[in-house]
Image (cartoon, coloured by chain):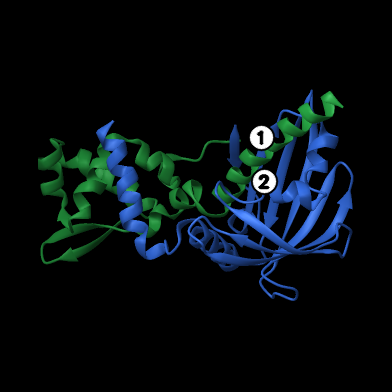
Amino acid sequence: MASTRRDASATADREIVISRVINAPRELVFEAFTEVRHLSQWWGPQGFTTTTRAFEFRVGGEWVFVMHGPDGTDFQEWISWTEIVPPERIALLHGESRGDPNAFESVLTFVVEGAATRIEMHTVFPTKEMRDEVVEKYHAIEGGQQTLRKLADYVTEIVLKGVEH
Amino acid sequence: MPRAATTSDVFNAIAEPQRRQILVLLRAGERPVTELAEELGLTQPGASKHLRVLREVGLVRDRKAGKQRLYGLDARGLRPVHEWTGGFERFWNESFDRLDAYVQNLKKAKQQE
């Protein structure tokens, strides 16, 4: 099951922590992050595909790819690894292209939990504004043009569904 | 993890059915507390209490209009709900769904080797 939490720390308003338990050994889960033939099979929400232009899994190496949304929209993506500690930790920079001033760093930690593995993805943004921008950008990726302007309608729908129950 | 107080957490605020009903009524426009109370069959202090919670989490704003105070919907307060149901976290939660399925196949393939 998915679970999400936010630490009540000084960075709470500019970080996002996402955690997930995968029922598989840690080495195997880690492996799925290390090769493009694996990554291309699962990266992105349902219905998304990727086309890779360059991939080199090493510190300082890059993954340059295009992410194709189900509605046909393409997104330029750029990943560069800043730390690789098999099978425990991967830190990466995520942006739209090399030198992207808005690139942000995520740290993925892989923790053994019995026969399963907990992945924890910790992303700390330099500022709250940048965090909000990225959240908005990902809304746009998933929802086409869904932006804050449509927020009222969107959430009212949730509220209405709640009332009907 | 300590639970956030009702007054500071939008999720708790909208967990209360009467508060959700207030939000639905405010969709149509600003209303004074007396009208909201009447429509929902609440006492005025009861409605005021709900409005205070909604205001404190940023879902409702109020302004003085002559002798009465009008309450209106402020959808920006729903941002945490919006983020939780979508955006970056949804992107990753869905990616991790796919990762999970993929790794299960990988596991099976390795066992057969």
Q: Residue B69 carries which label?
A: none
Position above or below: A17 against A161: below
Is the residue marked by circle 1 packed among few (<14), some (14-19), or many (20+) residues within 10 Å?
some
- Residue A55 position, x and y percent, is 81, 61
- Binning the other alpha carbons within 10 Å of mark 2 as few (below 14), some (14 to 19) or many (20 upward) gives many
Q: Work out whether residue A32 or residue B14 is closer to the camera in this orientation and state it.
A: A32
Along the viewing direction, whichever of B11 and B102 lies nearer the viewer: B102
In this picture, is B25 found above or below B76? above
Q: Residue at point 49% right, 58% down?
A: A139
Residue B98 x/y as whole percent: 63, 40
Q: What residue type is labelled 2?
A: Trp
User: Could you tell whether A160 is left or right of B96 in the image?
Assistant: left
Tell me the shade of chain A: blue
Q: Mark 1 points at which residue?
A: B101
| Quadrant the N terminus of chain B occupies | top right
Of B66 and A103, the residue lying toward us: A103
> Is label 2 in contact with label 1 (beta carbons under 8 Å)?
yes
On screen, residue B23 versus residue A97, left or right, reads: left
Find numbered disc 2 in the image and state the secondary structure of the residue it sits on: helix
Amino acid type, label 1? Ala
Position of the C terminus of chain B by quadrant: top right
Q: In the visual, does A82 lie left or right of A79?
A: right
Give the Cα distance between marks 2 and 1: 9 Å
Read off the chain for label 2: A
Task: Classify residue B11 by image quadrant.
Answer: top left
Question: Residue at image x 71%, y 42%?
Answer: A120
B17 above or below B28? Answer: above
Question: What's the mark number on residue A42?
Answer: 2
Q: Chain B is drawn in which colour?
A: green
Q: Residue A99 in the image: x percent, y percent?
A: 74, 76
